[in-house]
Image (cartoon, coloured by chain):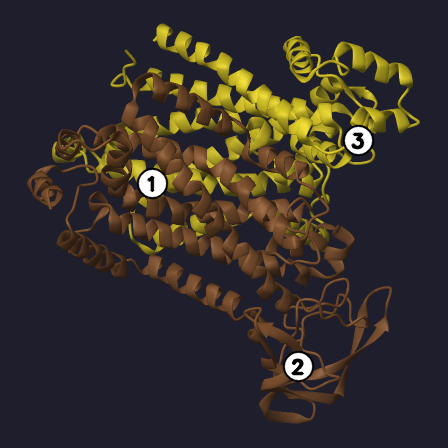
Chain colours: A yellow, B brown
Amino acid sequence: MLRHIARRLLHLIPMLLGITLISFAIIQLSPGDFLAEARMNPVVSSETVDRMRVSFGLDQPLHIQYLRWFWNALRLDFGYSFAFQVPVIWLIGSRLMNSVLLNLVSFAVAWAIAIPLGIHAARRQYTLSDNVLSFSAYLGISTPTFFSGLFLLYLAFRTGWFPIGGMTSIDHDFLPWWGKILDVAHHMVLPVLVLGVLSVAGLMRQMRANLLEVLRQDYVRTARSKGLAERVVINKHVVRNAINPLITIFGFSLGGLLGGSAILENVMGWPGIGKLIVEATIQKDLYVVMASLVLGSVTLVAGNLIADVLLVVSDPRIRYD
Amino acid sequence: MEQGRIGMVRQARPRGPEPVAIGQVRMQVHLAWRQLRRHRMALFGGGVLIVLYTLAIFAEFLAPYTLDFSDRERFFHPPIIPMFRDAQGFSPRPFVHGTTLADPGLRRFEVDPARRHYVRIFVRGEPYRLFGVVPSTLHLFGVDEPGRIFLMGTDQSGRDQFSRILYGSRISLTIGIMAAAVSIPIGMIYGGLAGYYGGRVDNVMMRLSEIIIAFPEFYLLLTLSAVLPSAVGCTTRFYLITLILSFIGWAGFSRLIRGVVLSLKEREYVLAAKAAGSDDFRIIVRHILPQTSSLVIVVVTLGIPGAILGESALSFFGFGVREPCASWGNLLTTASNLPTLILSPWLLFPGLFIIAAVVAFNLFGDGLRDALDPRHRTAS
């Protein structure tokens, strides 16, 4: 087990190199000389540009530039944002938690809804409620988040029940601490609804399929034939075994903590990483783009690793070497 | 033929794709079709797809207006729905009322109930070229000038949204297929080689494809499309976006193929081909990869909606297909401005088409998977 994890961690090194190399290549490919543009920009001081040039070796050949950038990135120095006039790491730090918060709450909501629904659908396979749930799940996974986001914003305006986009109200800073929490929660309802529906659809289908698989097993028949109450059979024997594969999905979802809400953040004006990367791409704020790309990928890879480990921990039948 | 005989012998094996001979292929197709016919949701999805693709193919003829037609006096005009009855009484023929712009600021249009414009079929209207070749002015339906029929309203330049959705469906519905056509062969060869050789080759090849998978999909789409040259025409841009989608798509697909090939390469017919002196590439392409065909069909059907969603998200943010071309994604861009959306909610219509297409592909793909995979077959 430990050896397996160690080997997976070793695999991460070439992967990290690959990820950073591709990110670097994409940035290099983008048209225009951004240093020249930064110099033209009156708000960027020439000292800043010079400092960037020296610390990132921008007058050096490409491979030196890459190594410099990689070395700096390892020490969490991702350079300077020309559009926001702050170091990239500050910018990312301020947005990171917003994305994580939004995604975490959506997961919690989605899991709390999806698992009971999946159990319900599987126990009543091919009945009306199962078919309705299945079709809704199809709708859920097929609706682009930017569409459902826009639609909910429109409804929010019509009804006036929810704030239209953003994360905080104008008077947020003047609220007491509990008021601040309520304010953010109020703003979070719609984005959580969109992301939650999306993951409920996927999770529910998975849970239903797992449960159907387990219901066919011999030990379920045994449990029933020895006269156990149906409630006990389902809760103690079936659900526990059917939930196992979902643990892996949980790991994968952790990987989406940063990237999962990217599109929606832009539609709903949620100040997270996904909104940052779109803004930065439009403004050609290259170092911000590069840092977001790398961080998003690293989170995803870490999530996959966790999923892998969780699978081994939760299912003793799986052995790696 | 040897392959066929060995295939028959191996029939007893319960799992995995089986080598099949020509006669068996027909039987398998027949079985799959019979299974698919019992899957009502899948048939529904297939039906919706046929309708959508028909709309796309005959867009010029079916659309009452052309892609670029604009009525400068009727920007953000609400939908005009044909009706049969008004204050003057009932008419067996559907008609629409004329409208005039009453308040440009609030985009209020006044309906003039005195002016009836009857809906006619096969009317002469804006000139176009059917399939880009045959010049014509014939449209399936329309109303006489100066009447207008905007079934789904108009956008900021007074262009008919319904017509633009039909034209846009060409881009949105082909991009998924095009992306699959590029990424599938690459993924098959790549996964085939990795799975067949195994060991160190497999290890290195899979690490490489994992790097592509490691990026959050939207981030990679976004940054790659930002690199594209911006001063190119619509068509070039469309092809470039297709390339990006394929670049992202092949990696995950190659992993699937590799997994199947890993198990297939141990089969006797592969050994037989080896013994007969076939070279590796021939074995992979002629003997192993054809056995993955049902997996490929399913993955393509379930992968196309991903590409449709990817393109529409990109175009929505202005990084994909751009004006004056229309795609379902970039038609929604106007709706992303909230004050505009609130006054003109019909701008959300293109989104319904995206959902319809993606749901249809998913339903159909799931049905296909059940039909092609013996393990999912319900007893008849």
Most foreground residue, A126 or B16 = B16
Eye-nearest disc, 3 or 1: 1
A84 relative to B211 in the view: left or right = right
Q: Which residue is mark 3?
A: A172
Q: Which residue is mark 1?
A: A208
- Residue type (three-letter) at the residue carrying disc 1: Arg
A203 relative to B6 in the view: left or right = right
- Say if residue B197 shows up in the picture: yes
Most foreground residue, A145 or B135 = B135
The quadrant of the picture occupied by the C terminus of chain B is: bottom left
Are callouts 2 and 1 both on one chain?
no
Eye-nearest disc, 2 or 1: 2
Q: Chain of mark 1?
A: A
Q: Which residue is mark 2?
A: B125
Q: Residue furthest right?
A: A42
Residue A126 locus on image (x, y percent): 29, 52
Please tell me in which quadrant of the rendered image residue B164 appears: bottom right
Q: Is residue A53 above or below residue B61?
A: above
Which residue is rendered at x = 64% and y = 34% of the image? B223
Q: Chain of mark 3?
A: A
